[in-house]
Image (cartoon, rainbow, N blue to C red):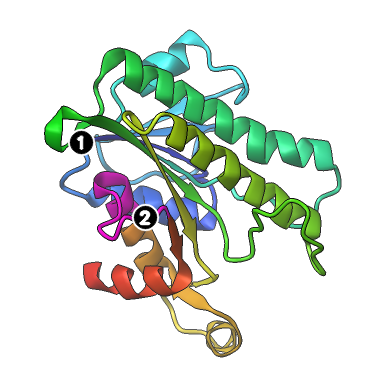
Amino acid sequence: MKVVLTGATGYIGAELLNQLAQHPEVTSVVVLSRRQLQQTPASPKVAVVIVDDFLNYGPAVLQAIAGAQACVWCVLGKPWIPNSEVARTVSIGYTMTAARAFLAESAAATTAVAQPGGRQVFRFVYMNGIAAERDQTKRLWYLGEYRRIRGQVENELLALADANRDVLEAYMMRPGMVTGTAFSVVDLAYKLALPSVGIVELAKLTVETALHGNKEGHTTIDNAEIVAEGRKFL
């Protein structure tokens, strides 16, 4: 399977790239990035495609993503927002531009994963966080604008998938605090104080979701499910 990944320069994205490159069912990983990665897995599967404008995919980018069957979108952004419009453009605009591009490619070329009954589907897996808020009118006591923006992305992705359910599935990953592979006092403190998940468990379940969907039919995968199901792939 050909999978597209964004956010590979980040902490979570880098682990996702490693897991995708190692997975036997993944034949190709196309990394969309603004710049070359400092380090990539030593795998012929991985190709980095430079994107100058995430609101307007040029012919080279469209050619690179052609035939992809899933995307893991891991552009998280910063919770402290200096400019709301820029934050909305990056979080909502970039994500929805990609989702619509994949939808058009999947519908036109019918190269997505074959499902029972002949149905064809592209899977868009969105990496989010536990505090995202879909209710845009809800009063929030901390990081309100950031949480509403992240929730609005989910609203729009789920609406797009619902309107195109024959060719598009959207999954929202909602981990809590993501901890590293090496034990630290900081990680222990987070685990005791906040819902948390190990980065390997998160990455493995995210890749599994991109490849096979969710066996329970959940479109929103919360931290408890990520922890429980992710451990099964260790």
| Image mark for residue 206 | 2
Q: Which quarter shows the N terminus? A: top left
Q: Toward which corner of the image does residue 52 lie, by quadrant?
A: top right
Q: Position of residue 136 (x, y in %)?
A: 74, 51
Q: Which residue is at a point 59% across and 88% down the rendered structure image?
A: 189
Q: Position of residue 76 (x, y in %)?
A: 60, 50
**Looking at the picture, which amino acid does disc 2 mark?**
Thr
Q: Toward which corner of the image does residue 198 lie, by quadrant?
A: bottom left
Q: Which residue is at a point 70% across and 47% down the rendered structure image?
A: 149
- Magenta stretch: residue 216 in it? yes
Identify the magenta region: 206-219
Residue 34 visible in the snapshot: no
In the picture shown, does residue 110 fall above or below 223? above
Foreground residue among 79 and 135: 135
Disc 1 crowd, CA 10 A, few/some/many (<14, 14-19, 20+)? some
Q: Position of residue 36 (x, y in %)?
A: 51, 33
Q: Which residue is mark 1?
A: 27
Residue 31 visible in the snapshot: yes
